[in-house]
Image (cartoon, helix red, strand yellow):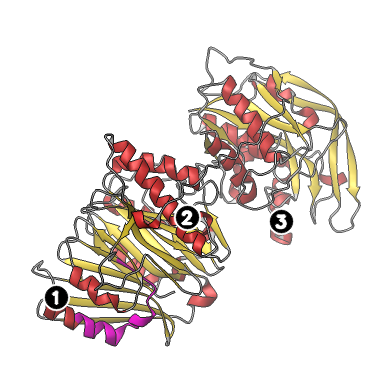
Amino acid sequence: MKIAALISGGKDSFFTAHVCVNELGHELCALVNLYPSQEGTYELDSYSFQTVGHEVIEAYAECTNLPLYRRPFQGLSPNQDLQYKPSDLKDEVEDLYAILKYVKEEIPDLEGICCGAILSNYQRTRVENVCSRLDLIVLAPLWRIEQPELLRRMVKAPMDSILIKVASMGLKPKKHLGKSLVELEDELMDLSAKYQLNCCGEGGEYESLTLDCPIFEKRIVLDDFKIEITADNEFAPVGYVIVKKFHLEQKTEFQNLTKSKKGYKNAGKIIIYDKPTELETGEIEIPQIDLNTLNYYGKNNESIQYKLFSKNDDYLYISGIWNQTEEKEQEEDNFKENANGIIGGLHTILNQFEMDLSNIVLLEIALNANSQIQPLEQILKQYFLVSPPSRVIWKNLNNEGKLKMSVMASKGKSKSLHVLSRSNFSPPCLGNYSHLTEVNQNLIISSSVTGRKASDLSFPESFEEETEQAILNLKNYLMVSHSSLQDILYCRIATNENLPEKTLENMKLNTKAIINVFKASSLIEGRVEIFVIALKKELIQDSEKTVFEQNFDNFKLNSQVFSLDSQSPSFACIEITLPNKNTLNEKDITEISACLEKNIQLDKLSKINLYHQGKNPSLLNLLSKSPISISEYNINGLEGSLFLECYFF
């Protein structure tokens, strides 16, 4: 992949470039940098970009023999939300957008950008937002690497980086500024243990300046610098280095395994791009839809009380709906019109409750074929520009020729784990969804988690390895949200092969959640998909799960109910197994009704998801005693089994 590197002069950005080139095999063709617009300014208080040491940056063009694209900026951050949305042209993120857009115009075959993000979600989300708008892939190979390990790797590379700013307990300007990481490695490790500081400086403890890196053809040698003290605090003094004079030395050995032998346009030169730009938000108008054109289960059927939507104090549930439109000659046109119509319908319903698309926390989709996924992504990207919801996609057997969507929404405060950067920590979002959505500061809802490997996005060869990888990915996503498997209240594992008993037993040992495993041959990605709903630790620690099983003449019923207390069920999963793969008769329905009335508080239900193969209208009618929303998924591979997911929150 042909990439450009965002550089600040610090160790993280150049070590990232080294890893991308010499370990991952990408072709580095340019450097990109933002610098203070006001002459004589040595440091800006930027939220996203290091500026201290910028007086040396231009030398990196000659050091690497690569073009260096630079843009002046003021370091303003009017939008300080974690999830960035373009709203103000003065924001420093829009300067990054402007320079990367220009670089892409100069290098049309540019595919990606590498950045040195290690732990900062604030910086990562802004780089991802800009690159997403420019259709560039973000490479962040250092993301979530343990900092002691990372520091050791940098020293061993070898990297020659010095401390150019300090602002932390244990670090003294006159003692530590100008010293290299090689000299300070042991001391930084000791200070990390003593004061809990980040040994790689991720908490702002220090900034660094790179003098040499494996990809450099020439190294920087400092001839003269001075130390500026900005806060002479006894416990945590602040100071930085101003470089007065330096020169370059030719290296006899350097390592750039992928550099083009033909060279690059403007190689070794500095290109300043300071032209004013316009704000590009990417927002589009949401279509206005007459709700009468939407269809859902039970519409126009007086015997069924299911509603287009149901609402409780915390959440709004919208049933699986599809759009009734005239057929077009081109199938692609039909699909786009249906998708836009459904989005418009969802928006109209949400508006009735003073909500909009940004309030959606879970989007469940049923479609007919994998070939519809790519056009669907293009459509959803227009509407969910920031913090898309968690998402599950099913391939329906009987979808009546229509795309369907159902929604869970909330007015409560929500935040998303929406990682687009490629790293070795976990696979990025490969579509318009978030890995996890946390809502009301207590509930966590995942997207379908697959067994892709983070390193190359491939699936492991064996099914067992793929399943273990999916569980590892889930653990990592939960860890970022300060949660774990122990906080799960419901876990659905859909596979197209038999789940290894060892894997299931390990899951049961790590969580007391309801675990629902079913075999489905119509998965969208890979051979296993895991979906979970979790709660914050303080809520789940006193919860309990009850299991009820009963055999009847024609079927077997298994019920699992998860409750936060004895009075309030939170979630239930009901499995009905038909050994002879028969359909349910009236006697069966009566028996199921009596069983569920006894074991589940049906009057408190908010939403039901039904997974089955074939048609079971009598079962759906049974559950219509309370007017709630329902989403029905007709899935290949479930012949002889039905699953009901019951939401009580």
Q: Position of residue 199 (x, y in %)?
A: 68, 51
595 is within the stretch colored magenta: yes
Residue 385 visible in image = yes
Residue at x 68%, y 50% (from the top left corner): 202
Q: Which label lies toward us, 1 or 3?
A: 1
Q: Quadrant of residue 3?
A: top right
Q: Three-letter amino acid code at disc 3? A: Leu
Counting residues from the start of the chain, the first of labels 2 and 1 encountered is 2
Whether residue 228 sits left or right of residue 602 in the image: it is right
Instruction: Assess whether mark 1 and mark 2 are in contact (beta carbons under 8 angstroms).
Output: no
Give the residue pinned by disc 2.
347
Please report the residue visible at 48 percent of the width from the left and 33 percent of the height from the top: 24
- Neighbour class for label 2 at 10 Å: few (<14), some, many (≥20)? many
Which kind of residue does numbered mark 1 sit on? Phe
| Residue topped by disc 1 | 555
* Of the pair 453 and 616, the residue shown nearer to us: 616
Q: Is residue 221 left or right of residue 358?
A: right
Q: Earlier in the sequence, mark 2 or mark 3?
A: 3
- Mark 3 — residue? 197
**Residue 179, image x, y percentages:** 78, 40
Question: In the rendered structure, which segment of residues is drawn in magenta?
Answer: 592-609
CA separation in Å, label 2 and label 3: 46 Å
Q: Is residue 54 magenta?
A: no
Q: State the CA–CA distance, disc 2 to disc 1.
A: 41 Å
Amino acid at the residue labelled 2: His
Query: Where 18 sits versus 363, above or below?
Result: above
Circle nearer the N terminus (1, 3): 3
